[in-house]
């Protein structure tokens, strides 16, 4: 049987390329089905008002299917989620925990406080830190299939 081991690695310890570099590299890849993708995106954008209503009624949104929804969700956030802060989580890491997300979000709304300093903070305090900084925080989480499969 395999050994159970837990890593001490955290989001802050990962040496990741910045978002601009990733976008630039992805931009070099050939894009297929351009017309179909544009039509689909336009059709989905017509749902933005309904999605906003659902969020205001305290429902969650789940988008699934082939292809990334990242650009669509970012467009939705930029156009519709203007009533408070938006927390974007690129959750491609199987070991990512909700507490790490809260610590990073609390650090983001409190400049000068590194998230690693908040990992020992209890959940209620982290939520209070976020709530005092923004009246209506929204969470956008992206996750790819390989990260989900790695966890199962």
Image: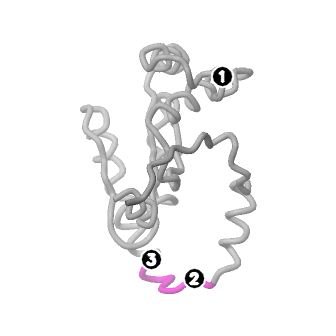
Where residue 51 appears, as percent x and y from the top left, is 31, 46
Q: Quadrant of residue 63?
A: bottom left
Q: Is residue 73 magenta?
A: no
Q: Earlier in the sequence, mark 1 or mark 2?
A: 2
Q: Is residue 75 visible?
A: no
Q: How many numbered badges does the structure rendering display?
A: 3
Provide the residue designation for mark 1.
117
Q: Earlier in the sequence, mark 3 or mark 1?
A: 3
**Number of other residues with Cα within 10 Å of mark 2, as a class: few under 14, some 14 to 19, many 20 or more:** few
Proximity of marks 3 and 2: CB atoms separated by less than 8 Å: yes
Q: Is residue 33 magenta?
A: yes
Provide the residue designation for mark 2.
31
Where residue 87 appears, as percent x and y from the top left, is 52, 37
Where residue 115 appears, as percent x and y from the top left, is 64, 28
Q: Earlier in the sequence, mark 3 or mark 2?
A: 2
**Number of other residues with Cα within 10 Å of mark 3, as a class: few under 14, some 14 to 19, many 20 or more:** few
In-front residue for pair 2/97: 2
Q: CA distance from mark 3 to mark 2?
A: 10 Å
For the point 47% across and 86% down, the residue is 33
Magenta stretch, residue numbers: 30-36
Vertically, is 106 above or below 96? above
């Amino acid at each position: 049987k395999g050994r159970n081991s837990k890593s001490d690695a955290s989001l802050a310890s990962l040496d990741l390329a910045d978002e601009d570099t990733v976008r630039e590299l992805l931009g070099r890849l050939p894009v297929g089905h351009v017309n179909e993708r544009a039509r689909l995106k336009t059709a989905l954008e017509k749902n933005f008002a309904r999605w906003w209503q659902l969020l205001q009624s305290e429902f969650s949104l789940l988008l699934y299917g082939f292809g990334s929804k990242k650009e669509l969700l970012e467009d939705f956030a930029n156009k519709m989620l203007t009533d408070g802060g938006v927390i974007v989580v690129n959750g491609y890491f199987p070991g990512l925990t909700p507490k790490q997300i809260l610590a990073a979000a609390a650090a983001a709304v409190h400049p000068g406080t590194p998230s690693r300093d908040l990992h020992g903070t209890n959940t209620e305090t982290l939520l209070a830190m976020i709530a005092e900084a923004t009246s209506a925080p929204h969470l956008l989480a992206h996750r790819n299939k390989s990260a989900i499969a790695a966890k199962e």
